[in-house]
């Protein structure tokens, strides 16, 4: 796959710009072209934080990057790639660490959907695992030395309320989000005292793209109670991240659900959750590729 990057820092006659960019601090955001990732980018731009935006090719990153630069007078560059690709993480990190100073990493890119496990194609399952688990882990590992080189750095991983319970018809998705939760909490303990603060946010349902809107609309009133906008989640998540909250749950209904999933026995709660997603499947008939949603 051809990877498209913002090439302004590669002008042969502009070595001074390379040095300037390297000593500046940037936030790197994956899944930045739409939904929550785009909301994170806008919110950070409002705070005058320079940005490195990562998303799939031909998904609007160049226009978004230019708009953020013009609107908020920040530095913004982009890298278009499929993070499930074999060499994509290494290529992204070589570009990022070779040209910029990075003190904020937001692992937002993810995918999911609702489908009977037996009917899912192997490629569909592999993409969820590759993006939600492999890409997040390897990107964090590769960028950690750069993050530690700054006096204060932040890692924010986007998990989900789905991480607090197994879910029929979302078996791989919810399991991948459990991984993100445990990985983040463990890394938080490892990096205490290093200057790198690690946090995880667990959003509930968000209308991040047309496929997600369709699915949420079929899940009934129960899921709609916890519905939050990407803009709200981004604003509050960053607010709590910079206040050193290591576990972020937003909204009264999501807090209530979190408490219920911790206290109600699984043999009671799991059939209720299953009924919700079975209703969604009956209404939509199939799963959608929901790349870059949480």
Image (tube, grey):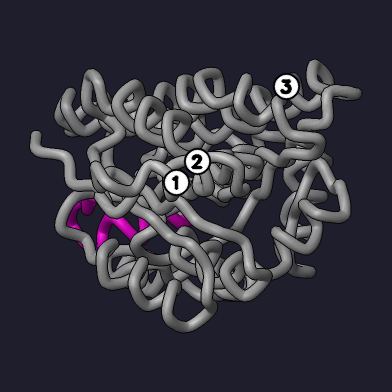
290 sits left or right of 96 in the view: left
Region in magenta: 276-289
Q: Nearer the viewer, mark 3 or mark 2?
A: 2
**Dot 3, crowdedness within 10 Å: few (<14), some or many (≥20)?**
some
Q: Badge 3 is on which residue?
A: 187
Q: CB of mark 3 within 8 Å of CB of mark 2?
A: no
State the residue at coordinates (70%, 26%): 149
The spot of residue 227 in percent (x, y) is 57, 72
- Residue drawn at 73 percent across, 33 percent down: 150
**Which residue is under mark 1?**
16
Q: Which of 267/62 is in front?
A: 62
Tell me if mark 1 has few (under 14), some (14-19) or many (20+) residues whose alpha carbon lies within 10 angstroms of its own.
Answer: few
Whole-percent x and y of residue 195?
83, 31
Alpha carbon of mark 1 to alpha carbon of mark 2: how far? 5 Å
Mark in the foreground, 3 or 1: 1
Residue 6's x, y, as percent?
Answer: 27, 52
Per the rendering, the mark at residue 172 is none
Mark 1 or mark 3, which is nearer the start of the sequence? 1
Q: Residue at x 57, y 49 (%)?
A: 26
């Amino acid at each position: 796959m051809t990877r498209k990057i913002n090439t302004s820092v590669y002008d042969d006659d502009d070595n001074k710009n390379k040095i300037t960019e390297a000593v500046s601090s940037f936030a790197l955001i994956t899944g930045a072209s739409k939904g929550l990732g785009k909301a994170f980018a806008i919110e950070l731009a409002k705070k005058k934080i320079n940005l490195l935006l990562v998303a799939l090719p031909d998904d609007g990153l160049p226009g978004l990057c230019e708009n953020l630069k013009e609107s908020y007078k920040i530095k913004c560059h982009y890298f278009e790639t499929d993070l499930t690709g074999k060499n994509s993480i290494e290529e992204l990190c070589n570009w990022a660490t070779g040209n910029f100073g990075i003190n904020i990493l937001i692992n937002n890119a993810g995918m999911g959907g609702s489908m009977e496990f037996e009917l899912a194609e192997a490629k569909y399952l592999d993409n969820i695992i590759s993006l939600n688990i492999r890409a997040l882990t390897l990107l964090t590992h590769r960028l950690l030395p750069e993050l530690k080189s700054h006096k204060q750095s932040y890692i924010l991983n986007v998990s989900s309320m789905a991480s607090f319970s197994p879910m029929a018809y979302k078996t791989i998705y919810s399991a991948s989000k459990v991984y993100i939760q445990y990985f983040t909490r463990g890394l938080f303990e490892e990096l205490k005292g290093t200057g790198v603060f690690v946090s995880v946010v667990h959003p509930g349902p968000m209308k991040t793209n047309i496929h997600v809107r369709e699915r949420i609309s079929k899940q009934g009133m129960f899921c709609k109670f916890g519905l939050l906008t990407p803009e709200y989640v981004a604003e509050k998540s960053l607010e709590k991240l910079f206040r050193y909250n290591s576990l972020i749950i937003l909204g009264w209904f999501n807090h209530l659900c979190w408490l219920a999933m911790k206290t109600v026995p699984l043999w009671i709660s799991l059939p209720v959750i299953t009924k919700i997603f079975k209703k969604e499947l009956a209404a939509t008939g199939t799963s959608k590729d929901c790349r870059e949603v949480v």
